[in-house]
Amino acid sequence: MLSILTTAFVLLFNFYAATKIFADDYYSSGNDSAYSEMYSTVAYGIGSLPDKETVDYADGDIVGTSTQTIMNEVLFDSIINTSISYMSRKNTYSSIVAPPDTYVDVIYFYKNATGHDVNISQIAVPYRNIGNVVRFTSNVLDNLYMNVTYSSMNYTDINTYGTYDGLRVPSGDSGKKVIATIPISYAVSLMRVDTNVNGENVEVSVLLLNNTNSSLHNVVYRHGDYSTDIDIEPNAEYIIQYTIPVQDVNNQEYNQIGIHVDESSSYCVLTASRANSWIDIGTVSVFNLRNDDESPYDYSWSTGSWLQNSRTNFCIKRSAYESLHQFVSPVEENTETQDVLDDNTGNTNNGDPIAEDNNNPTTHDVIEEQTSTEILGATTEVEEIVEEDGEEILQEVVEGIKKGIYTLPKTGVVNTKKNTILMLVVLAVESYLCYSLYKEIRNRNASKNRYTNIRTKSS
């Protein structure tokens, strides 16, 4: 009997011990994150880099890992200091150096070692300090109130957080997913370009804006042959004025404006103050709003991994870059091709003047001559010839002249094709006249001969 009781006690003890090993005491401790075994953190990945037609930068300045590589190759345990605690974050996959218009992906890592399913209704990612270098698009709150408990100590924070939909994590499950994408912003914006044509110059006025909370030094503005270095105060505007010769404004070098910025500051979200000790909410990489089925509370925030060893992490820095902007010239280019004869200047394309000649018609006169239906003389004579013979071909030519199908040229007007036709007509008429004259002479001679012969015989 005693042995049976002893065996039952051992089994119950082992079951109880196993339950304690695989189930966290987060709720029983009063939502103390020190007892949470729902582990999580975030990583920064480079989703895409900008087109170099809009932003010029050096590839060697880029620091960071592509989102694709992180999603395919990086495991949760590889970015956590497991020798210290699953709550301690390594300094990996958490810093980016890249030009504006780079899209940074925020990748959420998780591992459930609680022994039961965990429902995370919301994920909060701290973005303090990086507003100078990124452009938030949505799901970001500037003054989110965060309240957590760790080792019986209460910590609060009011700061900038991105809030995103959570997920349900089955017991023993681990994984990762992209929960946000934030673009790196431009330090300097080109707000406006005004132009005015004044005589032989184009007056240009440019308005720039410093988008950061820091002073920017040695910002280089260039446009064609014009270039200047400027300093811009935090969040301040700056006006640049200069002139471009009208004759140069449409040259290729003036098609584009460049603004070169080289910052030296990194903007970091987290800062650790002391080794091997979590004493500041500002070192936590992510927060989870838990609402498990067994929770005695409606909602409660728990902490993800934190930083240690007196360092900063989750930093974003703009690399040196030059933003490129199209310049629209206020002077229209003369793209029309000149005719051989320029009616306005009296010059040919090569600039040589055309001597005035009353016998040499202008282009306008030539067009009128070509469309004229006027019969230019000798029509009556041709009609008489046609009436005498009745040849259909010549009649057709005369009718064509009357109707304007065939037009005789004026002096000085050169039209090779039409002249050829007219010469053929004239030759045909002359041939006919010559033949008619020859025939008439021959007939008269024949009559004389017959008359002579008759008289000779009769005598």
Image (cartoon, rainbow, N blue to C red):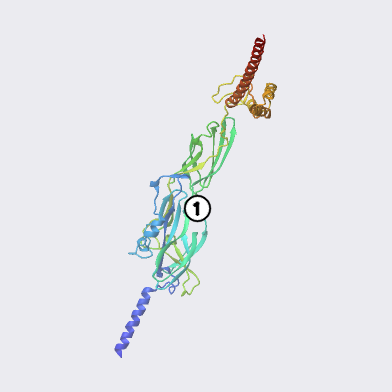
Quadrant containing the N terminus in the rendered view:
bottom left
The foreground one among 36 and 120 is: 120
Q: Position of residue 18 (x, y in %)?
A: 35, 76
Residue 441 image position (x, y, % from top left):
64, 15
Q: Mark 1 points at which residue?
A: 135
Element marked by disc 1: loop
Residue at 46% x, 47% y: name it: 51
Q: In the rendered view, would you say 342 is above or below 457?
A: below
Question: Can you say whether 103 is above or below 34 in the image?
Answer: above
Foreground pick, 179 / 430? 430
As drawn, is 301 to the left or to the right of 204?
A: left
Residue 219 pos. (x, y %):
47, 41
Q: Nearer the viewer, residue 446 or 62?
A: 446
Residue 149 against residue 342 in the figure, above or below: below
Q: Which amino acid does label 1 sit on?
A: Arg
Q: Quadrant of the C terminus?
A: top right
Residue 33 found in image quarter: bottom left
